[in-house]
Image (cartoon, rainbow, N blue to C red):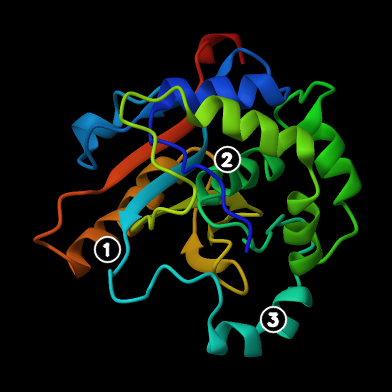
Amino acid sequence: MTSWIPMESNPEVMTKFLHKLGVPKDWCIVDVYGLEPDLLALVPKPVLAVILLYPLSKKGDNSLEDEEETDKMKDANNFKDAEVFHMKQYIHNACGTIALIHSVANNQNIINLQDGFLKTFLDDAKNLSFTECGKHLMESHGISTTHKDVAQEGQTEVPSEEEPVYHHFVAFIQKNGVLYELDGRKSAPINHGTTSPETLLEDAARVCKEYMARDPEEVCFTVLAFTNSDASAL
């Protein structure tokens, strides 16, 4: 199976990746330093997506294929809310890029996405199913090359493409008043209840806390927000 160099949970690296793909310069990835109200208040708004990096089990939970998920694939391809863009992950270590694509793809009505590899990819994927979108990413040389270039610019030593990675990115977005968790390893978007553009950050933080509560001794969680660096201009 195809493998990429894993992307570091580094706002500068991830922002650079988005800009190279055609996301306007005023949109960026920023750190969320804590999930309490006073720290969430420091995050610039509007927030279009929240990205969580969490640890996987080292007992095989990093597989991209799951028998139960495979059985559900038909349901995923028939997911009813056509406005939600969700794609399957077929590429090892591509979860960071997929979380970023989920973040942008579900907010194209707000972002003035410029011509580039990502716009071309999303235009081509408009009528594709969950699985077909994932396979289409495998064929997108522009996105894969950009990922490879940017993934080598983080602050930590770059691992090999074959080295096992035990952390995974997911994205939280708002669509039609619903908070969705988008994970390429899952067969369909996960509905986490009602939200709004104004409360997306706080509502996603609640779900992030639930992830952390499952493994209270684990400290390797990172939360990021996709936001606008010049919010006053919107």
Q: Residues within 10 Å of mark 1 (few under 14, many from 20)?
A: few
Residue 15 percent location from the top left of the image: 52, 23
Q: Type of residue at label 3?
A: Met
Name the amino acid, label 1: Glu
| Rendering coords of residue 153 (x, y %) | 45, 22
Callout 1 secondary element: helix
- Of 6 and 173, the residue lying toward us: 6
From mark 1 to mark 2, how far is it between C-alphas?
22 Å
Q: Quadrant of the C terminus?
A: top right
Mark nearer the N terminus (1 vs 2):
2
User: Camera-side residue: 161 or 200?
Assistant: 161
> Residue 140 placed where, x, y %?
79, 43
Identified by mark 2, the residue type is: Leu
Q: Residues within 10 Å of mark 3 (few under 14, many from 20)?
A: some
Q: Of the numbered discs in the image, which one, if any, rests on residue 100?
A: 2
The residue carrying mark 1 is 210
Tell which circle, 1 or 3, labels the residue nearer the N-terminal end.
Answer: 3
Query: In the rendered image, is residue 188 in sight?
Result: yes
Q: Which mark is residue 174?
A: none
Disc assigned to residue 73: 3
